[in-house]
Amino acid sequence: MIGSFQDSEMDGAVTGINVTPLVDIMLVLLIIFMVTAHFVSDTGFKVNLPKASAGQARPTEALTVMLDKAGNLRLMEHAVDLNGLKANLAKEAQLNPGVRVTLAADGSLSYQQVVAVLDAIKLSGVMRVALTAEK
């Protein structure tokens, strides 16, 4: 009888399951889901701009383009239209290829008006554009 018990152990019968690899895999999946859930929750449609609780200080001076509630454009306190904005920024971009432009648009403006100004800035050759928000 003792001989038959030893024979069954030698046959390679599995008497237990090692769950350590399963726990490792589950922890990795949990971390992945936690990280991606953060990104998914940030893509909602709740938009209340242009206020911000914190801002980054500008390390270098930038040209400021302002767009008021009536749709009037100003480049560094000088009134311009879209064509004048493109021309002035194109000159500046030729003189200083790394020029930065900051757009301060009124919060009540339509998205299309802001996009038109951003498009004019990009067409002038300026590659570094930022939007201004109120703290």
Image (spheres, helix red, strand yellow):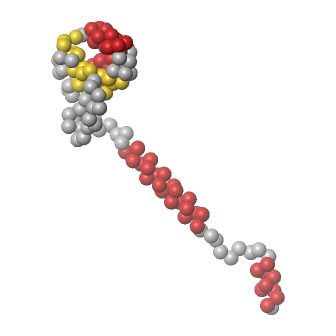
The quadrant of the picture occupied by the C terminus is top left
Q: How many marks?
A: 0
The picture places residue 134, in percent across and down from the top left corner, at 20, 34
Is 26 left or right of 56, judged from the image as shown? right
- Answer with the quarter of the image where residue 111 lies: top left
The picture places residue 51, in percent across and down from the top left corner, at 22, 35
For residue 36, above or below residue 109 = below
For residue 96, above or below residue 10 = above
Is 13 left or right of 84, judged from the image as shown? right
Identify which residue is drawn at 79% across, 78% down. 10
The picture places residue 117, in percent across and down from the top left corner, at 29, 18
- Answer with the quarter of the image where residue 9 lies: bottom right
Report if residue 133 is visible in the image.
yes
Q: Nearer the viewer, residue 105 or 4?
A: 105
For residue 13, above or below residue 44 = below
Report if residue 72 is visible in the image.
no
User: Which residue reaches farthest bottom?
Assistant: 1
Identify which residue is drawn at 32% across, 14% down. 92
Q: Nearer the viewer, residue 65 or 46?
A: 65
The quadrant of the picture occupied by the N terminus is bottom right
- Answer with the quarter of the image where residue 107 lies: top left
Identify which residue is drawn at 37% across, 45% down. 41
